[in-house]
Amino acid sequence: MDKKLYHELGFAKVDTHRNLRTGTDEVVFCIGKTVSQIVKISQIILKSNNRLIATKANPKIFRAIKSKWDRAVFHKEASVITVNKFPQKKTNKNILVLTAGTADIPVAEEASVTAEFLGNRVKKIYDIGVAGIHRLFKNIGEVQSANVIIVVAGMEGALASVVGGITPKPVIGVPTSVGYGASFSGITPLLTMLNSCAEGVVVVNIDNGFGAGYFASLINK
């Protein structure tokens, strides 16, 4: 493993020391970077630990990565690229990923792929928002048996509070930018989740499925 603190590329200082500090390599956030920059950063990361995860990616970026590393996989719905195999599952405890609606699935998939890439078992139940709350209660057994729960919701974001009120397990709320005008591209569900009166609910940023998956992995282990 490369024990340098970071690798200087001029446009980026790739943190090759992160795995030693945290047990996880640097992750490539693709938005705002050119394809060439992403490929060069990926080369350093893969040389350091032979595994890569890149978030908020697109098919153009994937084609460039795939041309260099044949094992690259594009998780299309999650907009995530991974290179090389996921590790063997390190725990039997489950992370449960819930969405309020079908439109929230892309962010939920980003959380799911991230958690699985970090060695966790993930279960998913989608489209069980409060507009049809009986769908949540029909799946109460899965909710109660999970070790950590990620709740992904747009619109008003109420599902996180509801789930937090029926389980003693930690709940990670992920507000999404899905919704009509007054949801303000995710601000409304963000504030709803932050103001939850249910104990045990924490919140990541709008559309931050990666952050939720990573944090859930820390809790799960």
Image (cartoon, rainbow, N blue to C red):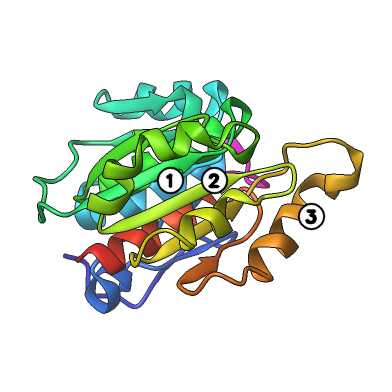
Crowding near the residue tagged with mark 1, few <14, some 14–19, many ≥20 C-alpha atoms within 10 Å: many
Residue named by callout 2: 152
- Taking depth in this image into account, of 72 and 136 the one nearest to the observer is 136
For the residues bearing labels 1 and 3, Cβ distance under 8 angstroms: no
> Please, what is the three-letter code of the amino acid marked with disc 1?
Ala
Identify the disc placed on residue 111.
1
Q: Examine the rendered structure and indicate whether residue 88 appears above or below residue 168.
A: above
Q: Earlier in the sequence, mark 1 or mark 3?
A: 1
Disc 3 is placed on an element classified as helix
**Residue under circle 3?**
188
Range of magenta residues: 29-35
How far from the left and from the top, in percent, is residue 89? Answer: 11, 48
3D distance between C-alphas at marks 2 and 3: 13 Å
**Relative to the observer, which residue lies in front, 117 or 104?**
104
Residue shown at the point (8%, 45%) measured from the top left: 88
| Quarter of the rendering occupied by the C terminus | bottom left
Spatial separation of the CA atoms under disc 2 and disc 1: 9 Å
Query: Which callout, 2 or 3, points at the residue further toward the start of the chain?
Result: 2
Whole-percent x and y of residue 54? 44, 43
